[in-house]
Amino acid sequence: MKIDYLVDTNILISLFNNQLRQAIPNGIIGYSVITTIEILSFKGLSSQEESLIRSRLQHSIQVFINETIAEKTIQLRRQYRLKMPDAIIAASAWDCEAVLITNDKQLSKISQIQVLSLPIKS
């Protein structure tokens, strides 16, 4: 599956909170199933907020964990000592040959993927 950009959880949270100074670039946008779990697991998320998030996510491609992503996750965790969710998201971008949009500085050190950060409003 061809995805131009895979969006990390922190970028989507900033987007939903209207905190991004710059728009997500045009192209085919994807997100990991891990992002879905992280973003919809917030305590206190109202049903209205959940509906809005789910509605917005429908316009992008959800990337599920497959055997290749699992193997790449293992490699990234060993090499970079990443937390499991971060490793899965990075491995998903790697597998899809997508640019990972994230503001997580640790993920910008991964040589297997290209990373783009977006400025946040102060």
Image: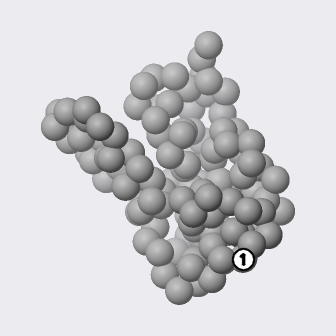
Q: Mark 1 falls on what kind of element?
A: helix
Q: Which of 18 and 25 is in front in this view?
A: 18
Q: Quadrant of residue 112?
A: bottom right
Taking the image as shown, residue 35 lies to the left or right of residue 102, namely left
- x, y (%) of residue 94? 67, 69
Image position of 114 with respect to 41: above or below: below
Q: In percent of the image, x 60 and y 17: which residue is there?
A: 121
Q: In percent of the image, x 60 and y 42: which residue is there?
A: 25
Image position of 107 with respect to 93: above or below: above
**Which residue type does callout 1 highlight?**
Gln
Q: Which residue position is annotated with label 1?
A: 75
- x, y (%) of residue 100? 65, 53
Q: In percent of the image, x 56 and y 79: which residue is there?
A: 70
- Asked if residue 110 shows in the view, the reply is yes
Q: In percent of the image, x 83 and y 62: which residue is there?
A: 111
**Visual colour scheme:** one colour
- Asked if residue 89 shows in the view, the reply is no
